[in-house]
Image (tube, rainbow, N blue to C red):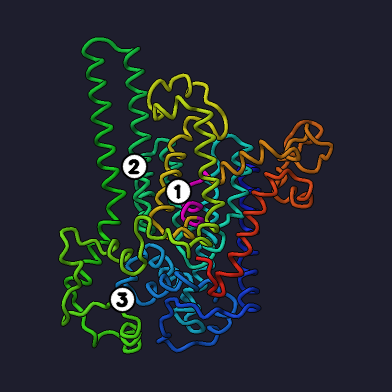
């Protein structure tokens, strides 16, 4: 393990511990808001340690986390539960029934699931940090440290699937870059079992093998002649098509399988209301939740030519659709998402200014000179596909989703917001460059007198005592990251509007 990786993992561990501590404090000090959120009744008798675990970790179970915990405990009972994909609840239940099974005499299933959330998301967050550490060394170190204080921190800590999705997505993209295409497809496929936007990762599978195929064709053009050249061309194209088709099918398979499971659950149900606990049936009647009932008529969406339950839920339960959130009453939510949107726009704009020809050619043609001597850092040609991916997420999230979700949506799906933030800090903060300042205490690396490198100093921690003397760029970026990091814990963990 390199010193940079060790430093990042230590910082990530510290931020996870501090997050768990602060959510417990905020949850104890601030009274819960009476929000109109999903709150199913408890049907299991509490055991000895349940009240203690609820007091310590109850802040991790609010808002959408309650859906994941309910699914882990009861399975997919209500129709709108199918908005939440199954991998994270499966992992939670697996931890509760294996690693935490010795506690079953003192903790109910609910209590063990809360402990599983704390342990599981901590481990998953640590796994998601390391794949972010690619590109040049300084940018990799600083962007990974910024990821540890992500503005979406509370969603990486609470019972949400963001940490799981980030670990699988970043790991899968790392494997894809290294040429391990099949392993990458498996990781990205599993990511689609965690969140629906894993389907967008298909774009990487289509782009990177295409880039590799074009590079091979350029090599064959200069090294082979005659019929052999034509054969190599055809083989490169066939291999590209097979890789793209098979990889797309693998990544999309969990989504399709989950939609089929939803169709079978509600369109051809095999359970009746008598098999469901009465308290949960009463909640369904009170809130208008649909439950599967073999004695009742099937829902109308079952009759559609393409009966996708996920699309029906987003439309009916969450009112998600093109421009549906563009209302005056939603201005505060647009303001909440504005910093993350700004980072995405700045990344795309700066990259286009640095590589206009590359962008116009989609990074696919005349790439030899670029890749033989690549530009280091943020403007490396290999970053192009990440910029496109980030921009697609930004446009879709702004136009078609609840816009306040944009922060966690992008922070768990792409490393670009952290790369551009680190790039701007390195570009505009003199304290990060020893040669530009008389203060030697703030630097990315320390060196001994014989030139051997010691463990790198954490520049985020080093900058904080000098925050007032930092550049306005640094104040803006660190202020955004840290304020959202803390505010998210304080508000979300008490059912206040931070979703």
Circle 1 or circle 2, nearest the eye: 1
Q: Which residue is mark 3?
A: 77
Q: Position of residue 9 (x, y in %)?
A: 61, 52
Mark 3 nearby-residue class (10 Å; few <14, some 14–19, many ≥20) = many
What element does badge 3 sit on?
loop
Label 1, label 2: how many angstroms apart (C-alpha)? 28 Å
Spot occupied by residue 457 in the image (x, y as percentages of width and height):
72, 45
Q: Residue at x 74, y 34 (%)?
A: 452
First in sequence: mark 1 or mark 3? 3
From the viewer's perspective, is the residue at label 1 or at label 3 nearer? 1
Asked if the stretch drawn in magenta spans residue 196, the answer is no
Residue situated in front as seen by the camera: 101 or 372: 372
Q: Distance of mark 1 from mark 3, alpha carbons?
A: 32 Å
- Among the 4 quarters of the image, the one containing residue 153: bottom right
Residues packed near mark 2 inside 10 Å, few (<14), some (14 to 19) or many (20 plus): some
Quadrant for residue 59, please give it. Answer: bottom right
Q: Quadrant of residue 301?
A: bottom left
Image coords of residue 429 (percent x, y): 71, 40
Query: Dot 1: few (<14), some (14–19), or many (≥20) neighbours within 10 Å?
Result: many
- Which residue does the image show at 53% across and 66% down from the upper left? 498
Boundaries of the magenta span: 407-416
Disc 2 secondary structure class: helix
In this rendering, which labeled residue sits more in front, label 3 or label 2? 3
**Mark sitting on residue 394:** 1
Q: Tell me the distance, in whole angstroms, between the alpha carbons under discs 3 and 2.
A: 35 Å
Q: Earlier in the sequence, mark 1 or mark 2?
A: 2
Residue in the picture at 31% in, 78% down: 289
């Amino acid at each position: 393990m390199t010193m940079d990786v060790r430093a990042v993992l230590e910082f990530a561990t510290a931020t996870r511990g501090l997050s768990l501590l602060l959510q417990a404090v905020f949850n104890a000090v601030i009274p819960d808001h009476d929000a109109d959120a999903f709150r199913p009744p408890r049907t299991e008798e509490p055991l000895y340690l349940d009240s203690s675990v609820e007091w310590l970790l109850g802040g991790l179970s609010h808002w959408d986390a309650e859906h994941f915990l309910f699914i882990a405990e009861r399975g997919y009972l209500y129709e709108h539960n199918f908005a939440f994909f199954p991998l994270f609840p499966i992992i939670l239940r697996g931890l509760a029934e294996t690693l935490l099974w010795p506690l079953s005499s003192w903790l109910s299933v609910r209590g063990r699931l809360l402990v599983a959330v704390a342990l599981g998301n901590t481990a998953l967050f640590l796994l998601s940090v390391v794949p972010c550490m690619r590109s040049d060394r300084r940018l990799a170190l600083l962007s990974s440290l910024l990821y540890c204080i992500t503005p979406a921190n509370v969603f990486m800590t609470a019972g949400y699937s963001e940490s799981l999705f980030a670990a699988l997505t970043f790991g899968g993209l790392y494997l894809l870059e290294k040429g391990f295409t099949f392993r990458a497809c498996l990781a990205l496929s599993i990511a689609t079992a965690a969140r629906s936007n894993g389907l967008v990762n298909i774009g990487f599978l289509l782009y990177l093998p295409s880039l590799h195929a074009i590079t091979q064709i350029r090599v064959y053009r200069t090294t082979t002649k005659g019929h052999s050249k034509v054969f190599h061309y055809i083989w490169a194209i066939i291999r590209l098509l097979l890789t793209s088709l098979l990889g797309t099918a693998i990544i999309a398979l969990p989504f399709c399988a989950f939609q089929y499971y939803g169709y079978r659950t509600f369109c051809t149900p095999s359970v009746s209301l008598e098999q469901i606990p009465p308290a949960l049936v009463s909640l369904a009647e009170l809130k208008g939740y649909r439950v599967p009932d073999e004695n009742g008529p099937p829902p109308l969406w079952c009759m559609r030519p393409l009966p996708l339950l996920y699309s029906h839920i987003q439309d009916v339960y969450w009112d998600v659709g093109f421009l549906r959130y563009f209302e005056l009453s939603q201005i505060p939510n647009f303001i909440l998402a504005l910093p993350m949107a700004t980072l995405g726009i700045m990344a795309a704009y700066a990259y286009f200014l640095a590589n206009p020809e590359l962008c116009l050619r989609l990074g696919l043609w005349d790439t030899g000179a670029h890749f033989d001597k690549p530009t280091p850092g943020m403007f490396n040609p290999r970053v192009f596909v990440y910029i496109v991916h980030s921009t697609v997420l930004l446009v879709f999230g702004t136009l078609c989703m609840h816009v306040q979700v944009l922060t966690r949506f992008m922070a768990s799906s792409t490393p670009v917001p952290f790369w551009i933030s680190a790039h701007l800090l390195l570009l505009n903060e003199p304290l990060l460059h020893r040669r530009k300042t008389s203060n030697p205490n703030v630097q990315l690396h320390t060196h001994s007198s014989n030139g051997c490198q010691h463990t790198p100093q954490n520049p985020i921690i080093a900058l904080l005592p000098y925050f007032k003397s930092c550049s306005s760029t640094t104040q803006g970026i660190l202020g955004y990251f840290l304020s959202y990091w803390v505010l998210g814990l304080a508000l979300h963990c008490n059912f206040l509007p931070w979703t």
